[in-house]
Image (tube, rainbow, N blue to C red):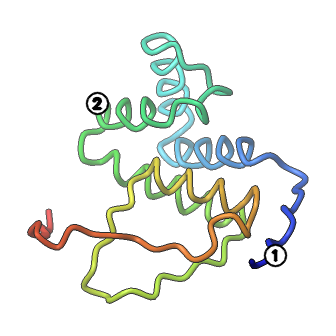
Amino acid sequence: MKKRKPAKTHPESFEQLLLESVDEAFTSLGDRSKGEIYEYLELELGIEREKIPDYLEELSDALELIFGRGAMLLEILIMKNLHAKVNAQHKYNGPKWLIPDLTFCKFVLLTKLAYDDPGMIGELNILVDTSEKLEIL
């Protein structure tokens, strides 16, 4: 049986890094828009800024409701910011034509697992249903 490397300790919690990543993505829209998004999340959905890490699905749904298809761009920006903050060293070795089924919420969960305990997830394998036709929107 392989020995797992012990979990690393980090000065900042993953949740704090996620919140900073969300802040940076929202700030890219302007301070006023950032404030309005947080206000909507809190007043309409009951999600305070500090609780966002516990409500990723709801955040994703709210962004889609507000921005439509543009929500994906914000989610990608959040993921890019988070990836840089956790100093991730992941590399996808699959075929270039394959588009992995990796949603915003799955990405954050996998990044959290890797951040909290790098030995926990080991090599990441992504399964794709090849019976579905891939579409470029």
Question: Helix or strand or loop: what does disc 1 sit on?
Answer: loop
Q: Is residue 45 above or below residue 61?
A: above
**Mark in the foreground, 1 or 2:** 1
Q: Residue at x 31, y 88 (%)?
A: 96
Circle 2 — which element? helix
Which dot marks residue 65? 2
What is the quadrant of residue 64 in the picture? top left
**Relative image position of residue 58 (x, y in whole percent):** 43, 29
Q: Earlier in the sequence, mark 1 or mark 2?
A: 1
Above or below, 109 relative to 32 = below
Q: Residue at x 75, y 56 (%)?
A: 116
Q: Which residue is mark 1?
A: 3
Q: Residue at x 14, y 68 (%)?
A: 136
Residue 110 found in image quarter: bottom right
Left or right of 9, for residue 87: left
In the image, 46 versus 123, the foreground residue is 123
Crowd around label 2: few <14 · some 14–19 · many ≥20 (10 Å) = few
At label 2, which amino acid type do we have? Leu
Q: Which mark is residue 20?
A: none
